[in-house]
Image (spheres, grey):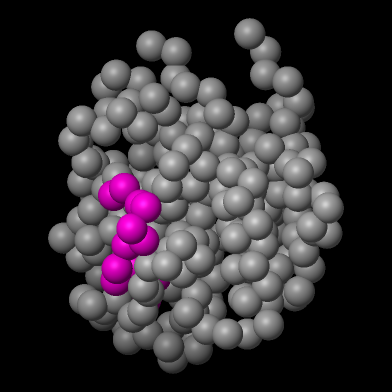
Amino acid sequence: MVDQKKRFALFLATSDSDFVKKTYGGYFNVFVSTFGDEGDQWDLFRVIDGDFPDDNDLDKYDGFVISGSPHDAFADADWIVKLCSVCEKLDHMKKKVLGICFGHQIITRVKGGKIGRARKGADMGLRNITIAKDNEKLASYLGDKVPASLAIIKCHQDEVLELPESATVLASSAVCEVEMFSIGDHFLCIQGHPEYNKEILFEILDRLLNMKLMPQDFADKAKSTMETAEPDRNLWQKLCKNFLKGRPEQV
């Protein structure tokens, strides 16, 4: 059965780097190529610049994606407060929202959890995260064979310190207790970056190095995690697409 045309909105909470603009035409294209299907309609809202849809237009969308950001999700900049307000409305509407990194933390904040600096420090590089056992929700998106772990690119200095009461943990790791969680059938939150690839991560590391925001050994260690391994992009794509489009995996 062919899906009806779906409409999605990307809430972009970061600026396009020169590299991403030159290589991909902007982060919008990175997200659409990862989570979109032919025939979908995707709209871009640069929330970091105060660009939001009108409240009356929210119901036109089947789902929303909130990107990562160099900003703190616990900060009170006008656009962050506005984003929280919009997420509260989407929660009441039970709209599908995929929160990635900063987005994962914003949803935590909106739903009454606690976020802050990561207890074990910033985490960058490829990580294997442990998937919660016997989880029916993940099985509905991935099929019967839910893997014991998934590799994903990490790039964050903050984390979820306390889960919202209504949340269910879907994955964890040795460095981060809450790698992925869900709330109901409409919020899916991932601390890592399913949309990132090796070259995007390496460019971020090099940029931070050049700005003297990171020591050389930290960057080298992060890069070394991808010398012989790759993220499980296909499985992440399947999981996120099936969540956003409300279609359980046909087993």
Q: Residue at x 31, y 48 (%)?
A: 168
Residue 217 in which image quadrant: bottom left
- In the image, residue 182 sits, relative to residue 76, either above or below, namely above
On the image, the x and y values in percent for residue 234 come to 43, 33
- In the image, residue 1 sits, relative to residue 234, either above or below, namely above
Q: Is residue 234 visible?
A: no
Q: Is residue 22 left or right of residue 199?
A: right
Q: Residue at x 75, y 75 (%)?
A: 49
Residue 149 in which image quadrant: top left
On the image, the x and y values in percent for residue 78 come to 68, 82
Q: Is residue 192 left or right of residue 55?
A: left
Q: Magenta segment range?
A: 155-169
Which secondary structure class fits the magenta region best?
strand
On the image, the x and y values in percent for residue 146 come to 27, 28
* Number of callouts: 0
Q: Is residue 180 magenta?
A: no
Observer-nearest of 115 and 179 = 115
Observer-nearest of 120 and 91 = 91
Q: Residue at x 42, y 28 (%)?
A: 141
Observer-nearest of 43 and 221 = 43
Quadrant of image for the C terminus: top left
- In the image, residue 49 sits, relative to residue 38, either above or below, namely below
On the image, the x and y values in percent for residue 131 come to 24, 42
Residue 135 in which image quadrant: top left
